[in-house]
Amino acid sequence: MTFLEPLLNELQTLATDGGWVFYALVALAFGIAFALVSLWQSMHLHDAPLISSGEWIKLLRNKPGSESIRNRLQEELESSGDLGRSLQETQQRLFAKSERRFPFAFIIIGAAPLIGLLGTVSGMFTTFNGMATSSANAPIDIISQGISEALITTQTGLIIGVPAFIVCALLKSRHDTLFLKFRQLSSQILQQPN
């Protein structure tokens, strides 16, 4: 409980000083987290046809014992009639969902630093408004509030965006590797004589 109280107090201070843009960034952070978890889950190939998702991953990563899985897969594909079409449909089932989700994830991740910059502009408006006030005590309070808002939102946008971009890029790299391995496997299956 002692660790949680200072953390909650700090978050409350950030939310108060960061203004409405901070709340938008927090909402965006939850959206980004959902998108990244969804992409990570799609890397497990849960919609795998013909063989189980674990067998697909074992096969595409060329782990020991994958030769028997490959032979069984080839038999399943050949029994469907049109081998090329079956491979194309399998590729769609394995990779289409994640291919659709990556562009969206990169867009919302890229929006985090930009929304942080929006907070910077909003904070600067508050600062300049405080400078224009004629009261003796109020300007310094308003100026410091505006600077605080500008810095908090900029920092929050970068803290959300940079790590999320790195995670998404790693997931994209893993996806591309699996996709390349599938294409190589498809090519081998198509070139193998019946």
Image: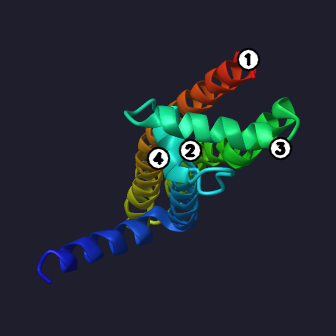
Secondary structure under tag 1 reads: loop
In the image, residue 171 above or below residue 48:
above
Are the residues at dot 2 and dot 4 in contact (C-beta closer than 8 Å)?
yes
Residue at the front extreme, as displayed:
194
Crowd tier of the residue under label 3, counting other residues whose Cα lies within 10 Å: few below 14, some 14–19, many 20 or above: few
Kindly indicate whether the residue at mark 1 contacts the one at mark 4 (C-beta within 8 angstroms).
no
Tell me, yes or no, whether the two marked residues, 2 and 3, touch with CB atoms within 8 Å: no
Q: Residue at x 67, y 50 (%)?
A: 50
- Read off the residue under disc 2: 117
Q: Is residue 146 above or below residue 103?
A: below
Q: Is residue 130 visible?
A: yes
Residue type at numbered disc 1: Pro
Question: What residue sits 69% from the left and 51% below the top?
Answer: 49
Residue kind at label 3, given as amino acid type: Ser
Marked residue nearer the N-terminal end (1 or 3): 3
The colour scheme used here is rainbow
Front residue of this view, candidates 27 and 88 = 88
Q: Label 3 vs label 4: CA separation?
A: 56 Å
Distance from the alpha carbon under mark 2 to that under mark 3: 55 Å
Q: Which residue is tagged 3?
A: 80
Gap in angstroms between the C-alphas marked 4 and 1? 60 Å
Determine which residue is flagged by label 1.
193
**Residue closest to the eye, 16 or 42:** 42
Q: Earlier in the sequence, mark 3 or mark 4?
A: 3
